[in-house]
Image (cartoon, rainbow, N blue to C red):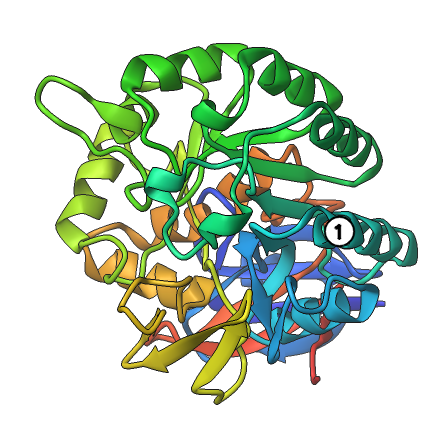
Amino acid sequence: MTTVFHGAAVFDGTRLHPDAALVVERGRVAAILPPDEAPAGARVHLAGGVLAPGFVDLQVNGGGGVMLNDRPDLEGIRTICAAHARLGTAGLLPTLITDTPATTRAAIAAGLAAAAEGVPGFLGLHLEGPHLDPRRKGAHDPRLIRPMQAGDLALLLDAARRLPALVVTLAPAAATAAQIGALAAAGAVVSLGHSEATAAEAAAAFAAGARMVTHLFNAMSQLGSREPGLVGAALDAEGVRAGLIADGIHVAPATMRVALAARRGADGIFLVSDAMAVAGTDLDAFTLNGRRILRRGGRLTLADGTLAGADLDPLAAVRTLVAAGATLPAALAMATSVPASAIGRDDLGRLAPGLPADLVHLDEELALAGVWRAGAPLTS
C-alpha cells in the first residue's frame, strides 16, 4: 500500500525539494521526506529530473482528434480528457468555442454527465463565448457572436450552480455588470477576453465580479501609453489571474518576461494550452464551425493565417517559459497550483499529505518521462 518515489527532485506545487522522496499511500501523498527517512515500501527509482504534480489546464478545446464543439457529449469529453492525461494533464476544463445555443446546451449537459460519472481529469467546463466583441473575434465565427440575453444568463447560472467548475469568457461589451455579478455570485469564474475594452471598462467588469483574463495579449485591446487596454488592466489589477499561451507564437518571449515582471512572477499568471483536436495525434488538419484549421510548423491557423488555438501542451509551455527566462519552479507553478487555485481547487496541482498522487516525471531535458494517476502508472 506504500510506494516511495525517489531519485529526482520533488516539486510540491510551489517549492522545489532537491533530492527528496515522495511517499504515496492508497493513491494519495503521505509525505515528502529525505530519501534516508522514507519508510519501507515499493520503490520507484527516477533517474534524475523532477517529480511534479500533474498539470492543470483551464483551456482545452480538444484532443485525441476531437473538438468539444463537434462532440459536445460524454464520449467527446472522455476522449479529450484521456488524450491530455497521456500528455501529463491531471485535470482540465474542456472548452467550448463560440457556437449555437443548442451546442452550448449540449456541452453543458455533457459536462454534467461527465461530473456525475466521475470522468478522470474532468474538472468542469470553460465556455469561451459566444458573448464576445466581434472586433476581437480571433478564430471565433462572427456569425455566432452575440450579446448575452436573459435566456443565456439563466442557462449559465444553472450550469454554474451544478458543474464542479465553470469558466465563462465574455467581453464587457456583450454583458452587463449585473450579468457579470450574477454569474460570479452563482459560482462561475468570469473571464474577460476577445474584447476591445478600455482599462476603465475592464476595471468595471472586475469590480462587478470578473476575476480572470483569457489568453493574455491575444484577441484583446493592447497596452498603450495613454490607454492601458485590457492587457494593462489585467497586469495592474489585484486578485485577477490571466491565462497565457506560452508557445512563443501567440506571445513573444520578451512579452512573457514583461508580464511576469509586472505580476511579480508566477502569481497571477497561469499557463493554458488552448489545445485543439490535434493534441495527442499526428493529424495535420481539422474543422471548427465548418472551417478548416491547418497544422503547420507548430501553428494552427485558418486558411487566411489567423491563429486558431495552439499546437501545445502544458509541458511544452513550461519549456518555452523556462527558455524565456522563468525559473523552473515558477513555470511549473503556473502549470499546476496557480490554475488550480484560479478555479478554487487548492486540492489539485500540489503535492502535500492527503492530496491525490497525480504525478508527472520530467527528465533532465524537461521531457515527459512518466505519468501516474492516484499513484499508479498511466499506461493508456
Q: Going 40% across and 65% down the picture, which residue do you hit?
A: 310
* Residue 189 locus on image (x, y percent): 61, 30
> Which residue in the structure is indicated by mark 1?
102
305 is higher (above) or lower (below) than 347: below
- Circle 1 packing at 10 Å, graded few (<14), some (14-19), many (20+), is few
Out of 2 and 308, give the one closest to the viewer: 308
Kindly state the secondary structure of the residue where label 1 is placed.
Answer: helix
* Residue 94 locus on image (x, y percent): 64, 56
* Residue 342 locus on image (x, y percent): 55, 35
Residue farthest toward the front in the current orientation of the protein = 143
Q: Could you tell me which quadrant the N terminus lies in? A: bottom right
122 is higher (above) or lower (below) than 243: below
Q: Going 56% across and 42% down the picture, which residue do you hit?
A: 130
Image side of residue 375 versus residue 290, left or right: right
Say which quarter of the image contains residue 262. top left
Q: Is residue 38 visible?
A: no
Residue farthest toward the left in the current orientation of the protein = 225
Q: Is residue 265 visible?
A: yes
* Residue 359 locus on image (x, y percent): 61, 64
